[in-house]
Amino acid sequence: RRESPLGRTNASPLLSLLPFAPNTHSSVWRELQQCIYFLFPDWPADCGNPAVTPSTATPRVVNGEQAIPHSWPWQVSMQASPFFPIPYMHGCGGSLIHEDWILTAAHCFMVPLNNPTFWRMCLGKHHMNSSMDVPSAEQCYKVDGIVRHKGFVYEQDRTDITNDIALVHLAKPVNMTREISPICLPTPGAVMPAGTPCFVTGWGDEKVSEKLNQAALPIVDFQTCSKPAYWWDSLRPSMICAGYESPDELKSACQGDSGGPFACAVAGSNTTWEVHGVVSFGPQGCIKDKKPSVFTRVSAFSDWINDNMKKFIYENGKTK
């Protein structure tokens, strides 16, 4: 079983070690419970292991390919409805990393979509129209908190896309099923070798697809991707480049969604997956020679993820 790479102990066993039988309704108990969860968030004991094995063949298909239904069970459709009677519409992708938390991109929550009440997080989907999934495994959850990186300044400076990362706190914990389970976070600081084929998944940004798509994109090393002909000084070490360079191999993160996962198999394993990237930006029109897709590198933000989960729990009086 794969445990959290952040090296945290789960809180629940610690509560059982108390040398007394606490009054679980008392304010002291609630404060104790909150402190323990603050120090030791309840990370999933098992992650990154889909019940349905994804197809990992890497055909060079311009538009990617349809995913095997429910083979990427951490995939989230983030849907927004600014006000009634506007229906919820797919706006971004995300990754389930914990029963209470979604990892995604900060740019998904630019004004006016920065209000948690506008959003719901839907999991267990294959068809965007869930009535086409028979039987439907979809579960949608309301949102009670959005944590954007404070260093995300793209709204003020359109040349700066750094720190494009955000966390979404769900109003109630996710019910894990065969079709819904979390992905592992990478080891802090980990950088995947150039050429590693990782997978971007989603329903697409340019034109929302009816079914979940996937595309294998090889990682492009930082030295190459930061050359003038590529992304030059837009690129930062806290980002990952991935994609093909020659026009006959073109695929890009437009097969995925803004904020969606860029998943890599754990080294030495073809069955356990980590979210190494969050879909951030790409060339206008999505596919262009020498303009690979750019992802926020999750392993550069391990401390930020851990600290901000704990901060949110503490400031909002949550126990998880």
Image (cartoon, rainbow, N blue to C red):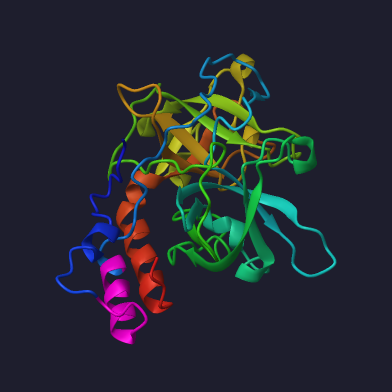
Which quarter of the figure has residue 314? bottom left
User: Residue 4: in sight, yes or no?
Assistant: yes
Q: Nearer the viewer, residue 153 or 271?
A: 271
Q: Position of residue 52 (x, y in %)?
A: 53, 27
Start and end of the magenta stretch?
A: 22-37
As drawn, 263 above or below 196: below
Q: Quadrant of the N terminus?
A: top left
For this orientation, the residue located farthest to the bottom is: 27
Residue at image x 43%, y 32%? 49
For this orientation, the residue located farthest to the left is: 19
User: Residue 115: in sight, yes or no?
Assistant: no
Asked if the magenta segment contains residue 184, the reply would be: no
Q: Quadrant of the C terminus?
A: bottom left
As drawn, 228 above or below 90: above
Q: Position of residue 313 (x, y in %)?
A: 39, 71
Q: Position of residue 222 (x, y in %)?
A: 37, 34
Residue at image x 79%, y 41%? 131
Query: Magenta region's main secondary structure?
Result: helix
Q: Position of residue 317 (x, y in %)?
A: 40, 78
Q: Left or right of 313: which side holds 124?
A: right
Q: Left or right of 229: which side holds 213?
A: right
Q: Nearer the viewer, residue 93 or 206?
A: 93
Residue at image x 53%, y 51%? 175
